[in-house]
Amino acid sequence: MSSSTIVSVEDSDTDFVALQHALKVAGVTNPIERCETGKEAAGYLLSRSSQLADWASLIVLDLNLPGIDGRDLLRKMRAQDPKRTVPIIVLSTSSHPKDIDASYRAGADAYMVKPLELEDWESKVGRLAQSWLMLKGDTASRQYAMKRKQPQKTTDALCRVMEREIVPRLLLAHCDTGLAPRYEQPKFIISEEEIVELTRLLFVSDVTVSSAYVAAIRAQGVPVGSLYVSLLAPAARLVGEWWRAERHEFAEVSLALSRLQQLTRDLAPARTPTTH
């Protein structure tokens, strides 16, 4: 099996066909494997001796599966992929905040309410999948994007997907729940110059350099919650703005966001094991 395989866990034939179409329109040429039930998905995804990252590049997961709760499957997949190497996009008919929050806490990288119209599958799901594959550095998707010249309208749409869907979820996915109250009113104000400098380092330097820069700011007594809200999130938005302004190619943006993801992962506090 190809290491760039996309796995769709979907029991609806209609939705699977819509996903195939959306990926094709977005220019995603990766092979797609489908699991129709929770039991089949658990056997297919979790029973291998190799890690998920060895053979899968993206998982598109429907939460409402016969035979198993999608969130349980999500948690088990993340246990096999603790470094979050393989992006997981959750598709669900539910827009309830509790379901969305539970999915991110279980390990989802993106959550999208299933669209009803085929055009929405194309513009939202297909583009989101393409963006995650490129962010991950998937060869097939990157080569396709480099081969064709995307019109400005498409580029802007992809930029909005990245800013509104991908980057905030990277931050949320790695945030400890205990940080949430500090998000509302950070005690420390990060200057615009510091945000710009971190963004510049994300583009031009190894992640160790930007990590050292963030560590120096944190050493001044800035709590992790304030770093997420006042430094990392604005830097993420600035990455998108610089791409939209054509200051950087998407390959550079992908690398910068990969470094940002590493920073969020390194900053996330270790969770204390629950005692019973």
Image (tube, rainbow, N blue to C red):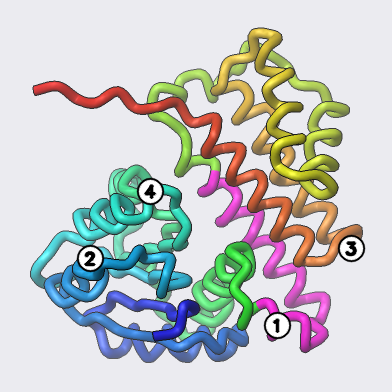
- Considering only vertical position in the picture, is 1 above or below 124? below
Q: Quadrant of residue 163?
A: bottom right
CA gap, disc 1 to disc 4? 28 Å
Check disc 4 and report the residue beneath it: 82
Q: Disc number at residue 246?
A: 3
Q: Quadrant of residue 216?
A: top right
Outermost residue toward the front?
A: 49
**Which one is in front in this view, the residue at disc 2 or the one at disc 3?**
2
- Residue 164 magenta: yes
Q: Nearer the viewer, mark 1 or mark 3?
A: 1
Disc 4, SS: loop
Secondary structure category for the residue under label 1? helix
Assess whether mark 3 and mark 2 are in contact (beta carbons under 8 angstroms).
Answer: no
- Taking the view exactly as shown, the residue that stands out farthest to the top is 221
Magenta-drawn segment = 142-170
Residue corresponding to mark 1? 143
What numbered label is drawn on residue 46?
2
Position of the C terminus, as image quadrant, is: top left
Q: What's the residue type where badge 3 is placed?
A: Glu
